[in-house]
Image (cartoon, grey):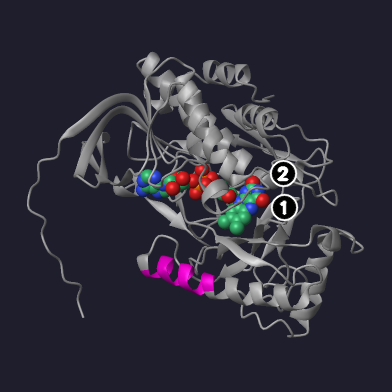
Amino acid sequence: MSQQIIKIPQREIPVKTETDVLVVGGGPAGIGAAVAAARQGVRVMLLEKRAFLGGNITASYVETCNHFYFKTTFEEDGLYREMKDRYVSHYGRSDDTREDFPAHRFSSEYLKVFLDHFLEKEGVDVKLHAFVNEVIQTENKIDCVVIQTKKGPLAVRAKMIVDATGDGDVAYSAGVPFDQGKAGSGLCQPGTLNFRIAGVDVEKVQSQPGGLNSINKRFRQDQLAGKTGVSCTRQGMALGRLTSAGQLSYLNFCDVYMIDPTDIDGQTKGEVDGRKIVMELFEYLKTNIEGMENIELASIAPEMGYRDSRRIKGHYTLTTDDIESARTFNDVIAVYPRFYDMLALDGDWSKGRAYGSDAVYTPLKNGVSYQIPYRSLIPVVVENLLVAGRCISSDHVAESTLRAISACMLTGQAAGSGAALAIQTDAKPAEVEMAALQGILKKQGVLLP
Ligand SMILES: Cc1cc2nc3c(=O)[nH]c(=O)nc-3n(C[C@H](O)[C@H](O)[C@H](O)COP(=O)(O)OP(=O)(O)OC[C@H]3O[C@@H](n4cnc5c(N)ncnc54)[C@H](O)[C@@H]3O)c2cc1C
C-alpha cells in the first residue's frame, strides 16, 4: 500500500531568540561544543530535549566513562579532563566503595547538578525541553532551528549550528546525506537499558573472591548453561558504583537487538523489551546472588542508551583503515587511544567468546592512537553547520571507538571552537585557519601533535 501523505498548512512561527553559536544536544559532545565556543567570547545557546544535561552519562547511567584509561599510559585531555577534575573536587568518588576496579565513575545524579552550574558559569544559555526536528533553510544555509515546546513551535536563529544530538537530527532535517549501521544490513549496535538496585549487602558481596566482579563471573557461567531465565542473549554485564548504602548504580546488560534508534517503533520496542529484561535480570540477582537477597529495583534509566545511529556525511569520512594505519592529518583536532568496541549487532553471541558473531572488540594498547580530522565534523551540503560526537563522518567500525564519551567531548570542543572562529573571522566553518583552531584547542588543554 502506498504511503498516505498530508500537507501541513503554512505556519507562522515566532523567532524566540537569536544567537551566534547554537548547539543542539547537551550530551558529552554538546557540552564540549558549548563551553569551547563560549570561551571564545561569542553568544552560545544550547538546546536539549531532556530535562537535564549529560546525554548518555545521565540519561542512560553510563557513569563509568573513561574506565579504559585506568592504569594505561594515556592521559585524559581537554574539557573532559577539566570537567572530571572539577567534579572530583566537588563530589570525590561519588560514594563509590569499589576497590576491585576503582576507576573514576560519575554519579549521574550529581553530574546533572554539576553540569547545570558548570554551563551557567561558562555563560551558556541552556534551554531544556527543547526538541529539534525541523530547520528553516535559505539556499545552503540554516537560518533557524525549530524547537517543539508546550506552547507550540518556536524558531531560534543562529549564525552557526553544531549538531551534537548523537543521531544527527539537525543535519538530517537539513537533508544532509548519512550512513547508518553496518554497510549492507544497516544494523546498529543494540540499545541497552541500564538500571540501579538498592539494598545490596556490601560487605557480603565484597568479601567474595574477586569482589563485585564475582557476580559477573557467576552470571556468565549460569547464562552459558542456560540457567538464568534471562531472555537477552548477552553473556556478561558491566557494573558501576557500589555505595556504602548498598546501591549498585549501573547494571549494563539489558540489550535489545536489531532496532533502529531513529524509528519510533524501534524506540518503543527497545524500551518495552528492555524493561522486561531488567525484571528478568533483577529476579536472577535476587534469587541467586549472595548478598543480594534483599535488593529492590531502585530505578530504570530514563531512556534506553544507543551507541550508534546516523553518521553524517562530511568533507572527510574517517575510516578503520585510517585508524589502523595511524594516518596523520594536517587538520587534526583530536588524538585518541585506538580501541574498537562493537557489540554483536544481531544478538548472536554463540560464535564469539565474549563478543558475538559480528562484534568487534580490540582493547586499547598503550601508545597506539589515531587522529580525527576537522573535516569529518563538516557536513557536506550545508555551510553553517558542524557535527560533533558519535554522529560525525566515519565508517561503522571507526565509530565504535570515536563514540567514547571523552572522544565525543573532543570533537565537540573542536566543533564549538571552529564555529566561533568562523564567526570571528567571517569565514565558513570549512575555511577556518587550521593553525588558529589548533592553537585554540591546545590552549584549552587538548593534546595535539
Ligand atoms: C549502554 C552504553 C554503555 C556505554 N559505555 C560507555 C563507556 O563505558 N565509555 C564511553 O566512553 N562510552 C560509552 N558509551 C558510549 C557513549 O555513551 C556515547 O557514544 C556518547 O554518550 C555519545 O555522546 P554524544 O554527545 O554524541 O551523544 P549523546 O550522549 O547521545 O547525547 C546527545 C544529547 O542530545 C540530546 N538530543 C538528541 N536529539 C535531540 C534533538 N532532536 N533535539 C534536542 N536535543 C536532542 C539528547 O537528549 C542527549 O542529551 C556507552 C553507550 C551505551 C548506550
Magenta-drawn stretch contains 209: no
Magenta-drawn stretch contains 273: yes
> Which residue corresponds to the image point at 59% horizontal and 26% vertical from the top-left?
330
Residue 245 numbered mark, or none: 1
Quick check: marks 1 and 2 in contact, CB under 8 Å?
A: yes
> Which residue corresponds to the image point at 54% horizontal and 47% vertical from the top-left?
58
Which tag, 1 or 2, sits closer to the chain's start? 2
Give coordinates of residue 216: x percent, y percent. Answer: 78, 67
Residue 95 numbered mark, or none: 2
Give coordinates of residue 54: x percent, y percent. Answer: 52, 42
Location of residue 257 (image quadrant): bottom right
Q: Kindly report the distance in space between the C-alpha atoms of the residues bearing marks 1 and 2.
A: 9 Å
Q: Number of callouts in the render?
A: 2
Give coordinates of residue 415: x percent, y percent. Answer: 48, 31
Give coordinates of residue 251: x percent, y percent. Answer: 66, 61
Locate the C terminus by quadrant.
top right
The reply to whether residue 390 is visible in this rendering is no
Residue 9 numbered mark, or none: none
Q: Is residue 351 above or below residue 5?
A: below
> Which residue corresponds to the image point at 59% horizontal and 74% vertical from the top-left?
279
Looking at the magenta stretch, what is its main secondary structure? helix
Q: Amino acid at mark 2?
A: Asp
Question: In this orientation, which residue lies closer to the viewer: 322 or 74?
Answer: 74
Residues rendered magenta in the picture: 265-275
